[in-house]
Image (spheres, rainbow, N blue to C red):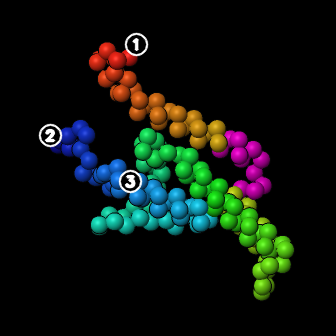
Amino acid sequence: MVMGPPKGNQNAKKLKTTSIKLIAYESYCKWIAKGEEKAAWVFEHKGTTLTWETMEKYIRNEPLVFHAHNKRAAEAHGYQHWLELGKKMMLGEIEGKVQPAIYQMFMRNKFAWDKEGRDSATVKEAAMEEFKNLREQAKPLLQEAKQEGNYG
């Protein structure tokens, strides 16, 4: 009979402390806020390498540590970066050969410019996911409070 690790084992977990989680999350948000593609982000710390997929799992699974509004703000800043670049291009403030068609295609691909209902559906989906994760994390805390007589 093969037995797995004991319940609660954290050996495979890449980010073990809250402080390192927050450092990685700040790095991730700063990367996105610069307008960079999240798939190109990597976090390396003391022999640990973390990519965007793992960071997204942390954000989904630990919303009490990884506040989703920070990522949404970073996404807005990244969007602002590319909009500013487009404005400069339209006003002729960028020297050299300007390619409006390439900019337009980039914005369609990166921000789904031509997808109807992208904003409301995406925001609603993210909010529901965040709520579900918070509810799951709160269950043990509520159970503990009930046992201690601190909750109805």
Location of residue 81 in the rendering, given as x and y in whole percent from the top left corner:
68, 65
Mark drawn on residue 62: none
Residue 99 x/y as whole percent: 79, 77
Q: Residue at x 59, y 61 (%)?
A: 33
75 or 120: nearer the viewer: 75
Identify whether 113 is placed above or below 151. below
Residue located 77% across and 80% down the image? 94
Residue named by callout 1:
152
Real-space CA distance between mark 2 and mark 3, rounded to the nearest whole angstrom: 36 Å
Callout 3: SS: helix
Which residue is pictured at 71% across the width and 41% down the height? 120
Q: Earlier in the sequence, mark 2 or mark 1?
A: 2
Mark 1 neighbour density, 10 Å: few (under 14) some (14–19) many (20 or more): few
Q: CA distance from mark 2 to mark 1?
A: 44 Å
Image: 57 above or below 104: above
> Which is nearer the N-term, disc 2 or disc 3?
2
Q: Looking at the picture, which amino acid does disc 2 mark?
A: Met
Q: Disc 3 or disc 1, which is closer to the eye?
A: 1
Tell me where the magenta segment starts and ends, as one range.
112-122
The answer to whether residue 61 is visible is no
Residue 21 is labelled as 3
Which is more toward the observer, 81 or 42?
Answer: 81
Residue 1 image label: 2
Q: Residue furthest top?
A: 152
